[in-house]
Image (cartoon, rainbow, N blue to C red):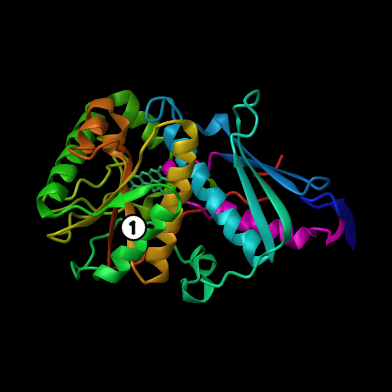
Amino acid sequence: MTREHPDETGDIVRTPVLDAAAVETLLAAAVAAPSIHNTQPWRFRMDPDTWTLEIRTAPERSLPLTDPEGRAQHVSVGAAVFNLRLAAARLGRRPQVRLLPDPGRPELLATLHLTGPAVPDTDHAREPDLYGAIARRHTSRLPFTGRPVPEPVVAAMTGAAHTEGARMQVPDIIETRRLLRLTAVAETRNHAHPARTAETRTWINAPAAHSPYGIPLAALGPPDAAGRMPVRDFTGPLPAPRLPALRFERHAQVGLLWTAHDRPEDWLRAGQALQRVLLTATAHGVRTSMLHQAMEWPDLRAAMSGPRRRCRPQLLIRFGYGPDGGRTPRASGEAATT
Ligand SMILES: Cc1cc2nc3c(=O)[nH]c(=O)nc-3n(C[C@H](O)[C@H](O)[C@H](O)COP(=O)(O)O)c2cc1C
């Protein structure tokens, strides 16, 4: 089946109708994105007439204490938008994304318009298969081996952030320690804040729970026996089965993801950059996890920027070689559609 519609120049063109399998491909890619506490704060609506997918927030899955401005929520939705772009290209369509297209509808974070056939990308052959990496990427909160990720792979990851209009800086050992210390301070503050701990804990699922949202206990990692790696304690002081402490890599490799501005569209760009970085790492066999705690306290977030000019920190990404992370569930693309 085809549909007639005007192209950018006003000429009438015939485009094949997007079938149910194609919509499913798009949504399956979108919902595989990482999101803070696996809240999956997105909703989708396909408008078959305009070939436009609307991507909106799911306000009922926000984190009022951890993320009062909705910044992390935007970053998460941005990651889903990046997956949608890859899936659209996989379907042979050219994705046209507009961020925050309607000031009167702030909950509408982006639209993805599937335009005509994808233009063959001459650079494509040299790029890793990012679409193929979507299903293989998992957050790994386990200790890494300590084998350094080689410079060309690190350069591909920083280049990925740059391509999406963000920056990822991989600091030296001294600066890495400083960033981890700030993250540890945030972790201590979170611990001392019972309401925040309670909010986080509501997103952790017991083994018997079958919620498609939140993080199963099995996907959480151990604490660092040496106390150097400030992994997030999602369960707080309440009783919960815990993994015994293990030694993490001595010299962590981290990347500070940042943008030059701090508006909602920058957060959405940061999310697309985040996902491009994570998928590039995955395509090279590199594991990743995220340390967001310092971003949740304004003074610590400001301190994370250090001497970098015009640096609005968005996320600290830890990367290295090691075991795959446990799987987290997802609500289906259909369930996320309204
Ligand atoms: C903005 C953002 C912040 C995150 N912060 C943390 C964090 O501080 N600690 C952590 O272990 N995981 C963090 N994550 C990872 C999510 O918990 C993870 O993406 C989610 O549980 C889904 O699991 P998956 O990445 O394995 O698909 C964050 C993810 C995003 C997008």
Locate residue 249: give its quadrant.
bottom left
Disc 1 residue type (three-letter): Thr
Q: Nearer the viewer, residue 197 or 290?
A: 290
Mark 1 is surrounded, within 10 Å at the Cα level, by few (under 14), some (14 to 19) or many (20 or more) other residues, namely: many
In the rendered image, residue 309 lying in the magenta stretch gets the answer no
Find residue 56 and report its horizontal and vertical position in percent: 62, 36
Highlighted magenta segment, given as a residue range: 12-41
Residue 106: x %, y % from top left: 59, 27
Residue under the image location 37 percent in, 64 percent down: 281
Residue at image location 44% in from the left, 59% down from the top = 327
Q: Residue at x 63, y 63 (%)?
A: 89
Q: Where is mark 1, residue-wise?
A: 158
Residue 334 pos. (x, y %) = 69, 49
> On the picture, is 216 further left or further right than 299?
right
Image check: 196 left or right of 207? Answer: left
Decide if residue 191 is in sight here: no
Q: In this view, does 113 lie above or below 295?
A: below
Would you say 198 lies left or right of 176 here? right
Q: Nearer the viewer, residue 90 or 239?
A: 90
